[in-house]
Image (tube, helix red, strand yellow):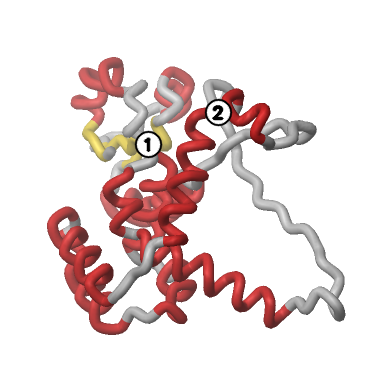
């Protein structure tokens, strides 16, 4: 959110703890004390006297928000996920496992892409050119390219998985399935079990005390 100093003084106390609010950037005609604002309101990321300065930091903030939106589930490392303890697992984890199986077993076609782009046009008019290009050019072998490109698809997918937005996940089902299959295909080509040793990679993500 970008607000003026005057507006921020009146509304921050009401909106600061709303989960959907990721960051606040304050625009002020005069340079004011950043530390006071940041200490009192941790979602305030800075005070700026020029709109251009805010525009320069927004791409990084958006990218960071997208990265922090990747879904996480926790399962004890020493726990055997078997029939006898399935009822003790986190319901969200169980729900995502079932949803994943449904997505991977569903058969998709060209209509799935059209349904998705129609859905996107209804919620994101600003990305119309990208949506039209996706509808024309998308192929299962380009799924990784589309996911790693700087476009709305990356943030849309991560947000949907993080918030378990079922409608969006179902519309993205063909893309999730293609992405999964293509990664497995590339992995099997690059790392033959009989000739190449496996290695472990890790992805880190910061968690707040509340999380």
Q: Please give the label number shown on residue 90.
A: 2
Of 94 and 57, the residue lying toward us:
94
Q: Is residue 61 visible?
A: no
Marks counted in the figure total 2
Picture layout, residue 117 above or below residue 156: below
Q: Which residue is mark 1?
A: 23
Q: Residues within 10 Å of mark 1 (few under 14, many from 20)?
A: some
Point out residue 176 in the picture as x, y percentages from the top left corner. Answer: 43, 62
**Residue 36 lies in quadrant:** top left
- The answer to whether the residue labelled 2 contacts the one labelled 1, judged by CB atoms less than 8 Å apart, is no
**Residue 164 lies in quadrant:** top left
Picture layout, residue 198 above or below residue 63: below
Point out residue 37 in the picture as x, y percentages from the top left corner. Answer: 40, 24
Point out residue 172 in the picture as x, y percentages from the top left corner. Answer: 34, 59
**Residue 81 lies in quadrant:** top right
Point out residue 136 in the picture as x, y percentages from the top left corner. Answer: 24, 82
């Amino acid at each position: 959110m970008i607000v003026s100093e005057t507006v921020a003084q009146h509304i921050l106390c009401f909106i600061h703890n709303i989960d959907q609010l990721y960051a606040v950037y304050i625009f002020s005609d005069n340079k004011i004390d950043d530390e006071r604002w940041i200490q009192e309101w941790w979602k305030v990321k800075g005070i700026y006297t020029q709109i251009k300065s805010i525009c320069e930091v927004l791409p990084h903030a958006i990218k960071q928000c997208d990265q922090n939106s990747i879904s996480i589930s926790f399962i004890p490392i020493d726990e055997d996920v078997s029939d006898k303890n399935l009822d003790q697992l986190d319901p969200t984890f169980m729900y995502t496992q079932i949803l994943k199986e449904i997505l991977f077993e569903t058969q998709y076609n060209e209509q799935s892409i059209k349904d998705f782009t129609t859905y996107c046009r209804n919620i994101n008019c600003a990305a119309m050119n990208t949506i039209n290009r996706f509808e024309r050019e998308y192929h299962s072998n380009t799924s990784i390219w589309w996911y790693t490109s700087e476009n709305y698809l990356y943030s849309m997918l991560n947000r949907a998985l993080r918030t378990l937005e079922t409608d969006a996940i179902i519309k993205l089902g063909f893309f999730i399935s293609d992405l999964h299959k293509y990664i497995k295909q590339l992995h099997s080509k690059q790392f033959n079990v009989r000739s190449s040793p496996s290695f472990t990679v890790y992805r880190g993500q910061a968690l707040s005390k509340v999380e």
